[in-house]
Image (spheres, grey):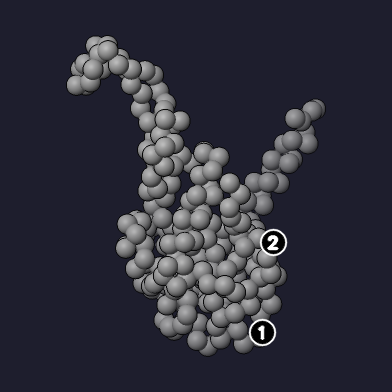
Amino acid sequence: LNWTVMPMGSMFASFRLDDHMCLRGSGDDLSCYFYQLLEAEQALSRRAFGRCVTGPDAARRGLSPQLRYRMVLKVLGMGGLNSPDIAQSTHVTTLERAGCMTEGAVIEYGLPFPRGDVLEGIYQDDHLAVGHVPINKAHLREGEDLTRVRASHVEYARAGLQRETTKAFGLSTGGDADSKFLAWGTEVDGRHGVAPAPLAKCLEIFALVTIARRRPRTQ
């Protein structure tokens, strides 16, 4: 479908902070998000899997033994070619109804990084809201980022989308926002203005490259 463009955490490295300003982040994760989205009814005939059930096996399940049955996945499959576009567009549209993801505030790869007081991005099931606030007010539970977090929670409930509360952070937990947060795999330090890849990931890549170089041939 190629409907959507998603953000990258490394884009935060392009944001310049004034000495008296910082970034604070809050995030939510939707629980088993793809399985909360129903597949289109006309596509169900192409979502069958498993062995055929017929004859005595079908009769034991109260089905006609003369017919052949297969199980069908009635929700979006995570490996589906179009599933990421559908899931991304659904999430974005849902939060747009709540007044979130407004023009000039959205983080998307390939577009200029937003420079306003609130930044937002969605990556499939993850929603990130970032406040660009004075350092001396970063601890206060107020601001446009908090407004959008609260609005997103109301809209999730209205739309019947369940949040994975154990993965929430910052203002999304009901607590304080944090100037150090994880944005789609990038560790953002919103107080000092750095956005590196996590050290553990860098070490894993280094180890894999070292192992690959020791092999006589790599594929």
- The residue type indicated by label 2 comes to Gly
Q: Nearer the viewer, mark 1 or mark 2?
A: 2
Q: Earlier in the sequence, mark 1 or mark 2?
A: 1
Q: Secondary structure at mark 1?
A: loop
In terms of image quadrants, where is residue 59? top left
In the structure shown, which secondary structural element does the residue marked by tag 2 occupy?
Answer: loop
Residue at 60%, 84% in the rendered image: 21
Residue under label 2: 110
Q: List the single residue furthest toward the front.
A: 42
Determine the residue located farthest toward the right in the rendered image: 216
Look at mark 1 in the image and give the residue it sits on.
18
* Depth check, front residue: 67 or 156: 67
Would you place residue 5 above or below residue 72 in this image?
A: below
State whether residue 194 appears in this view.
no
**Is 142 in front, or is 200?**
142
Q: Residue drawn at (47%, 61%), measured in percent from left and top?
A: 93
Residue 62 to residue 168: above or below? above
